[in-house]
Image: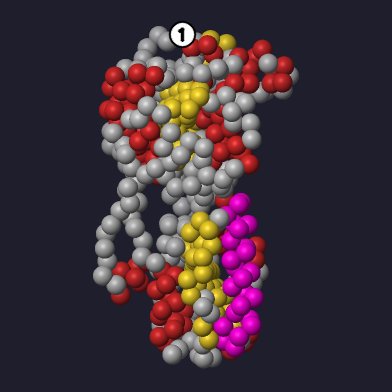
């Protein structure tokens, strides 16, 4: 049986369970290796940051990290005895000088002003490495997000828009709701537009006026009320529409491809010298961004995956030498597969992209399957969609195709593993 959980709300069974003889092979593979580090801030940290006062210009000299873009102007050397590298966030004050600043509206809100040290100090940073040796360098720091005492927008002047791009993720409507309500109740913003249908929606004339009343119960619905799409990115046309609508704050909810597009949009805004803030809210169900506490949707997909794993376990133990194979999301990281495995306690083998595995020989998948079947008479395998792709490339004709967002299309490792095991034990 192969259960494909490509969407936590859509679980389909592609194959019936199949019975194996008692010999076969593998190992349970877990890894806690670091995924790709992305300098990105959580939802309300973004909300605060793009309202808030930019740190005063200092005598920091700018230079590029060898691992980054050689033209990167957002990596700064902060000198002194406690010197460190500051991986800063782009800001429109980088190219617009002498902008006036205003008191943060939160200062007049009793719900926030009573909280001691609610506002973030201009010089606060967050370290990339939590544990360091006494003599080691300070390393890379990130700008600490949060509300400053001064902002660059008056509430009445703000004209914001929100757009959702890429695939669906549990919690999208909750994020939209919190942006709208946060802008309205915390900052006094009254003009918020929803862009219908992803980046392509900027080209159309379909916009949705978003108010707290309109979004009041959208968190109870699935999907995104704004609609979504992949691709459709033309930064010139998008910025044209931003100017036409008089928008000065753009909130973009999406994944890797979406944020690459957001960076291009900001560069076009910079080129035109516009006072427009672009805030990217990370939408990754994989929970693969270490600098935030947790990405929205991750808990939901882990919980939903339990249903598929439970079904696989029930059916596998009902027949002799039954194997349940459950494929979960995880293109480049195995957090969903790993957390679902640990939560279930019914899984015998977890295969993730961070830990390469092999099929034959000592310590291979076939060997491990044989051992587990001999011991228990059944087993459950959980595999992340990105695991074992190098094995598929060797045995299948590799096709380097991409979706509309620029993501590489992966081979179906679940079907492939299922087929290989069937052949071995037929």
Q: Is residue 149 above or below residue 47?
A: above
Q: What is the x, y in percent for residue 175?
A: 56, 36
Q: Residue 401's image quarter?
A: bottom left
Q: Secondary structure at mark 1?
A: loop
Give 150 or 269, whichever is nearer the viewer.
Answer: 269
Write the residue at 34% across / 68% down: 390
Count numbered badges in the picture. Answer: 1
Q: What is the x, y in percent for residue 173?
A: 56, 38
Q: Quadrant of the C terminus?
A: bottom left
Q: Which residue is mark 1?
A: 100
What span is colored magenta in the figure?
Answer: 299-322
Magenta segment main secondary structure: helix
**Membership of 136 in magenta stretch:** no
Write the residue at 44% across / 70% down: 414
Graded by Cα atoms within 10 Å as few (under 14), some (14 to 19) or many (20 or more), the crowding at tag 1 reads: few
Q: Is residue 386 above or below residue 324?
A: above
Q: What is the x, y in percent for residue 360?
A: 41, 83
Q: Is residue 63 above or below residue 312?
A: above
């Amino acid at each position: 049986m192969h259960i494909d959980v490509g969407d936590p709300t859509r679980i389909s069974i592609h194959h019936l369970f199949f019975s194996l003889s008692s010999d076969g092979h593998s190992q349970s593979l877990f890894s806690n290796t670091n995924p790709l580090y992305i300098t990105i801030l959580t939802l309300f940290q973004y909300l605060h940051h793009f309202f808030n006062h930019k740190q005063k210009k200092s005598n920091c000299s700018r230079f590029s990290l060898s691992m980054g873009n050689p033209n990167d102007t957002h990596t700064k050397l902060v000198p002194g005895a406690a010197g460190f590298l500051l991986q800063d966030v782009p800001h429109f004050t980088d190219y617009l000088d002498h902008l006036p600043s205003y008191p943060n509206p939160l200062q007049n809100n009793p719900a926030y002003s009573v909280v001691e040290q609610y506002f973030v100090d201009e010089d606060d940073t967050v370290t990339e490495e939590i544990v360091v040796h006494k003599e080691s360098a300070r390393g890379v720091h990130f700008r600490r997000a949060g509300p400053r005492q001064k902002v660059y927008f008056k509430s009445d002047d703000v004209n914001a828009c929100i757009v959702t791009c890429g695939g669906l993720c549990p919690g999208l409507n909750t994020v939209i709701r919190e942006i709208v309500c946060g802008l309205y109740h915390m900052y006094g913003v009254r003009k918020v537009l929803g862009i219908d249908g992803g980046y392509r929606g900027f080209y159309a004339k379909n916009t949705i006026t978003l108010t707290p009343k309109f979004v009041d119960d959208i968190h109870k619905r699935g999907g995104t009320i704004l609609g979504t799409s992949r691709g459709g990115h033309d930064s010139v046309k998008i910025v044209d529409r931003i100017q036409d609508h008089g928008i000065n704050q753009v909130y973009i909810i999406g994944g890797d491809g979406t944020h690459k597009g957001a960076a291009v949009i900001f560069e076009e805004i910079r080129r035109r010298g516009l006072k427009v803030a672009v805030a990217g809210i990370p939408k990754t169900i994989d929970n693969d961004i270490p600098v935030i506490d947790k990405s929205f949707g991750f808990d939901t997909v882990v919980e939903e995956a339990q249903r598929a794993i439970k079904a696989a376990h029930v059916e596998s133990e009902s027949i002799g030498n039954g194997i349940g194979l459950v494929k979960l999301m995880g293109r480049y990281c195995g957090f969903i597969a790993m957390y679902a495995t640990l939560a279930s306690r019914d899984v015998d083998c977890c295969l993730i992209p961070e830990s390469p595995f092999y099929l034959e020989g000592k310590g291979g998948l076939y060997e491990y399957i044989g051992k587990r079947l001999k011991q228990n008479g059944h087993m459950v395998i959980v595999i992340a969609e990105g695991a074992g792709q190098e094995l598929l490339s060797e045995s299948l004709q590799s096709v380097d195709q991409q979706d509309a967002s620029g993501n590489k299309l992966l081979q179906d490792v679940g079907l492939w593993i299922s087929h290989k095991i069937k052949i071995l034990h037929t």
